[in-house]
Amino acid sequence: MARKLRMGMIGGGKGAFIGPVHHRAATLDHEADLVAGAFSSDPAKSLASGKALGLDAKRVYGSYREMARAEAERPANERLDFVSIVVPNVAHFDAAKTFLEAGFNVICDKPLTTTLAEAKELRQIARRSKKVFVLTHNYTGYPMVKQARWMVRKGVLGKLNKVVVEYPQGWMTGFITNPNQGIGLWRMDPKVAGGSCCMGDLGTHCENLVRYITGLEIESLCADLGSFVPGNRLEDDGNVLVRYKGGVKGILYASQISAGEENPLKVRIYGLKGGLEWRQEDPSYLWFKDPAGLVVRYSRGNSNLCPDAMKYDRLPWGHPEGFIEAFANLYREAFRAIRAEVAGRKVPAADFPTLDDGVAGMAFLETVLASHASKTKWTKLKR
Amino acid sequence: MARKLRMGMIGGGKGAFIGPVHHRAATLDHEADLVAGAFSSDPAKSLASGKALGLDAKRVYGSYREMARAEAERPANERLDFVSIVVPNVAHFDAAKTFLEAGFNVICDKPLTTTLAEAKELRQIARRSKKVFVLTHNYTGYPMVKQARWMVRKGVLGKLNKVVVEYPQGWMTGFITNPNQGIGLWRMDPKVAGGSCCMGDLGTHCENLVRYITGLEIESLCADLGSFVPGNRLEDDGNVLVRYKGGVKGILYASQISAGEENPLKVRIYGLKGGLEWRQEDPSYLWFKDPAGLVVRYSRGNSNLCPDAMKYDRLPWGHPEGFIEAFANLYREAFRAIRAEVAGRKVPAADFPTLDDGVAGMAFLETVLASHASKTKWTKLKR
Amino acid sequence: MARKLRMGMIGGGKGAFIGPVHHRAATLDHEADLVAGAFSSDPAKSLASGKALGLDAKRVYGSYREMARAEAERPANERLDFVSIVVPNVAHFDAAKTFLEAGFNVICDKPLTTTLAEAKELRQIARRSKKVFVLTHNYTGYPMVKQARWMVRKGVLGKLNKVVVEYPQGWMTGFITNPNQGIGLWRMDPKVAGGSCCMGDLGTHCENLVRYITGLEIESLCADLGSFVPGNRLEDDGNVLVRYKGGVKGILYASQISAGEENPLKVRIYGLKGGLEWRQEDPSYLWFKDPAGLVVRYSRGNSNLCPDAMKYDRLPWGHPEGFIEAFANLYREAFRAIRAEVAGRKVPAADFPTLDDGVAGMAFLETVLASHASKTKWTKLKR
Amino acid sequence: MARKLRMGMIGGGKGAFIGPVHHRAATLDHEADLVAGAFSSDPAKSLASGKALGLDAKRVYGSYREMARAEAERPANERLDFVSIVVPNVAHFDAAKTFLEAGFNVICDKPLTTTLAEAKELRQIARRSKKVFVLTHNYTGYPMVKQARWMVRKGVLGKLNKVVVEYPQGWMTGFITNPNQGIGLWRMDPKVAGGSCCMGDLGTHCENLVRYITGLEIESLCADLGSFVPGNRLEDDGNVLVRYKGGVKGILYASQISAGEENPLKVRIYGLKGGLEWRQEDPSYLWFKDPAGLVVRYSRGNSNLCPDAMKYDRLPWGHPEGFIEAFANLYREAFRAIRAEVAGRKVPAADFPTLDDGVAGMAFLETVLASHASKTKWTKLKR
């Protein structure tokens, strides 16, 4: 085996949700080890987190700037191969910029930034840096999403007509009657989350999932956002009519106040020759619906899938893989690119979301916010 | 048993879909017999249909006006107790008017008319006539829809926040590539269907289902309609953002070009204390989702349901009842009212859709059409 | 339309479950009318039931023998075309014999009789009578069961290897702690139900369903019966290992004490080329499982089904048909045969369970009872 | 964090299925590192496997005996904390014995051994060694299985009446027509697999799952085994009637020739107060069925679960965890025990399958084989 890659983490201290996901996903295939981190802007908290992770205290930092500086000076055989950025949205831009400019490959949580302008600037910075940049729209890592993409791209559905993508969650419902419990959450704070709560967190996943599978480009959209949690200055529900190029119609919606819903991101794609359905809570299956009424279930681990859906299998069929495995598939692809970059080889095309996806996501998000504020029905996609 | 009611039918000749449904629904509980009809405007076809149904040829007519006239002169012991109108949309108004004014109780297919003005006028006519008028928004006949209504009205969900109702069908997809096969259909012909194809046929069911369950009133909406079948002058796909009174947000969509979808009308209702989900293709179950993650399935035939959900049971739990039974539940309620009317008793309140529902449906439909034509985002509900 | 057939009913008085099912099933397609009956052995109760059904009191009887005698003397234009026998098991034999010998076609509930000897004798009586005899193993009336039969018989599964059929119900669980509530039920009374409760009621459906779909013949079996309801002298749970001819292995089980189960009769059939699964609670779908992992759902109402699965459709796809429609499919086939018999034409082969099925069911049931009582593992099928 | 544990692996070389599962499961929570192994009895193959895993070549061995000897001599700060044994069945006994006697904690694949006598002997050896021994009946690691156990043990179901457990797979179906492809498999070779193929591999999981959840003890059973793959000297299908102590009835079956089935291990448990159902292919949900017909779905990640079901969560609800996570839950518990053992502390009670479970599994398996060979219906559980 090639040597294990050295990973650094920005954010993701004790109690965080997504930090440990990145850590497990990065190490699931034993291709990387976490060796450094700035887990919190509070140095004591960062140190405690690093200790709990078994890290050398010297490589645990109270700020990512300090970390970038110090780690950049490490000798080659200790040098980080990449950092994973899992801080709240508003810090993505600067953290990513800092590490790219310090010469590190970057894996970054979504949404990319808080504005389209920042997203474009970051894309420029990354291009100049020639470093690898991966945006963790993790749902594209599911093999059956790759199968869907392959089927659509191969023309199995024929010309597309309609796309419905939905991502209702219910976890903020309780804050409606008990706003005190929720209002401290960074997701509801414009200073930390940026201009959006629900659509930035969930809506961008919807947009990305549709684009990943279909390649469709949004032409214009019409959005209605709602804030149900008292005191929430951002939206916790969003419903969008979409017109894609080529005459395809769409509905996209996300919610945090759909009581009782867990995490059922779902996409349905309809073309001339059939429909496809995929649902994140039951991710091993992809459903194809024949116009004449046959429904065919494809399942992960089978030999009748496309190569992209088969290459990530860690387990045989019927042995459920889940969220972490899908996340790890992004890391596996990222590592292919990072190993090339580290070795000075040409970075291969790889199957992970990029800064182009991040820019598209921010364009979508800014258009949604503008549409919501507008009295005109259709708002053209911002560029 | 009280005597069987005498039923007449307008439309529903050979080859029709909904005529036999009405016939089976009306007779499922052995409360009525079909004894007269104008099954087609072609007298020969009407006669052939009547013969196939075993009717006395004297009571089979080539026009409903002729039928209304002739049947009105029958003696009391032969007189029709009601007629069921199952002609295409554009003829609903005149047929209903004719029979109401001739003194007959009327059961009529949806959508009520082709304009809001007609709908209101028909309501006036019916009021003057003092006859019973039932609009067959048949999906409200499912016991689990009644259970949903009961739960919402009882406050089980708490204050409502969001409603998503969808009705995607795929059967017109084939006409996109073979428009010749489809374009003769009356549903696509404005002269027969009125101003709408998909939203009149399916969208009004969505609107009615939400109103039946929740009682919510639409404040304004934003619609995007599409015509995918070449040559279709009406829409075959429609997507609507809805704002209900009281701050409730909604999505309502219907489609005839969602390839591979059969008839999955589905409604999800979210409140402060939980969510509800019901799906027409699996109609015996109602799903309640607790905000803390428990999901509870209620099923038809159980003793833990509300009285309205229990009173229609014809079979024990686990013995599937379907579309015809739900339809027959409307007829059962209609018969309660009709028997009273026929006997000269006060017509009781009964659980079936009325002309108020029909007017509301046409208001919704006209607003959808107006919104689609408008560049302004929100269009107030027409009245 | 040919004239409506005249139906008589034996049993099925007020409060009965299966009587109204037969009535609705027989009349769903408007091919028959109920005109006479002996609804109870209590004349007053029978009369009340007949009245509630709107029957002429002269044709309502207090005993089926009296009815057979009186109805046999009616003129041809009043004469019953068939009787439906829905009394408890122990009376099937004599009631069927009485009407066959009086010259009536017979539709009879299952299980056919209470002993194999009786079943064989009844078969002889029916043969001599040349009358039509239909045994209502109603689950074979579901279109998707017919599709399964067609696929198996066409070799879609290849040579069969294994069959698992199960029919767990839970409704008697409550009687375990409250035996007083249940012990009066005729199903638990050997004098009324015969030698079996659960296996006669449910197990014979399992046996029949497998034989209908596959044509497999049982070679030997090994049964374990249980009585969980205190005081129940018959079994309320039964588990059977089956060896079919040709080396096919099977499991067959039925239960009335599987708490929380409603009516999920389910069959799974495995061959060299795939597996099939059908479930009564979701009867519109048949699932085919490819050995390489594709799962294909066939659904009622589609144009890709076999002729036998398509010919009974009353509604388009996605409009659920249920238990009554499946039951009515048996009647529809029965009517084809009965009309021929009444007209003196050759009775056509028709798709309904016959006395051969009844004899097979009783052979199965007696073998199950013998096996349970035996210390030897395998008991050969009785003949 | 405490230091990472040092793991050794016996078997699991390149191309193996279960070796990488153990490796990922052991390291998912970053509590252990793989540092030594005897991956194959072919030294070159073992070395290649070790290299591919990034191991120090000095700690890669061509035989487990050599490994046990060499590793036992390592200093404390290098010494293995445990070994994971993932060789075929027949080698479990000697490998486990070797490492226990050399002073190592052992994690071992199931079935424990190939005979009951060996299993008992191994239990004695382990007791003498005072080392931790974990048997990887991994399905007990799923949180919802723990929830089921808790509910049954708490009496939520009341007194149990019936248990149905099934584990049909279809992957060997292809070998029936192409036996050459399959017959080389070690699972079909008595010299490697022991006396059983299907029941040893899958049937013991069934037995263990029922015992884990319910604590029921088998009294006697009646088994019918089948070999469908030509040339397979062991069984590839097995069907068992079970009588548990206390009057509980059961069905247990497993299969490798149920075409089209992936890995749907499923258990249904029925008591006086309700039924429970859990299915491995949809492992995040547990279904409780109320006798009155309510069905309640519990889902992983919720706050309404029992402590044992909650303590393993790595992700919030709706973010699927799968097979590896469940496997890792066994390791997490194992590590609690191993850390105590290594530290010389009292080994705590922990929630993983033990040698008692292994002995019970082998008793079950031997009884199944004896029953199959017997003409008597019931065979008492061997002890």
Image (tube, coloured by chain):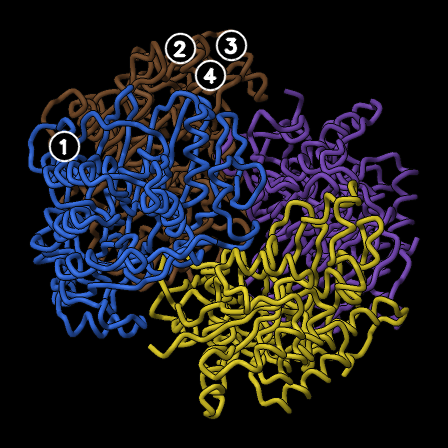
Chain colours: A brown, B blue, C yellow, D purple
Task: Say which residue label 2 marks.
Answer: A183
Q: In terms of secondary structure, where does tag 4 sit?
A: loop
In this rendered view, identify the residue nearer to me: D199 or C91.
C91
Q: Disc 2 marks which amino acid?
A: Ile
Of the two numbered discs 2 and 1 in the rendering, the one whose residue sits closer to the viewer: 2
Q: What separation in Å lies between label 1 and label 4 (alpha carbons)?
A: 36 Å
Q: What separation in Å lies between label 3 and label 2 (alpha carbons)?
A: 23 Å
Q: Chain of mark 4?
A: A
Q: Disc 1 marks which amino acid?
A: Leu
Of the two numbered discs 1 and 4 in the rendering, the one whose residue sits closer to the viewer: 1
Label number found at residue A39 = 4
Q: Residues within 10 Å of mark 2 (few under 14, many from 20)?
A: some
Residue B348 in view in this figure: yes
Left or right of A303 in this view: D244: right
Tell me if label 3 and label 4 are in contact, CB under 8 Å: yes
Label number found at residue A45 = 3
Q: Earlier in the sequence, mark 3 or mark 1?
A: 3
Q: What separation in Å lies between label 2 and label 1 (alpha carbons)?
A: 31 Å
Q: Residue at x 42, y 48 (%)?
A: A143
Tell me if label 2 and label 1 are in contact, CB under 8 Å: no
Residue A327 locus on image (x, y percent)? 44, 37
Q: Chain of mark 2?
A: A
Q: Disc 3 marks which amino acid?
A: Lys
Left or right of C46 in this view: D94: right
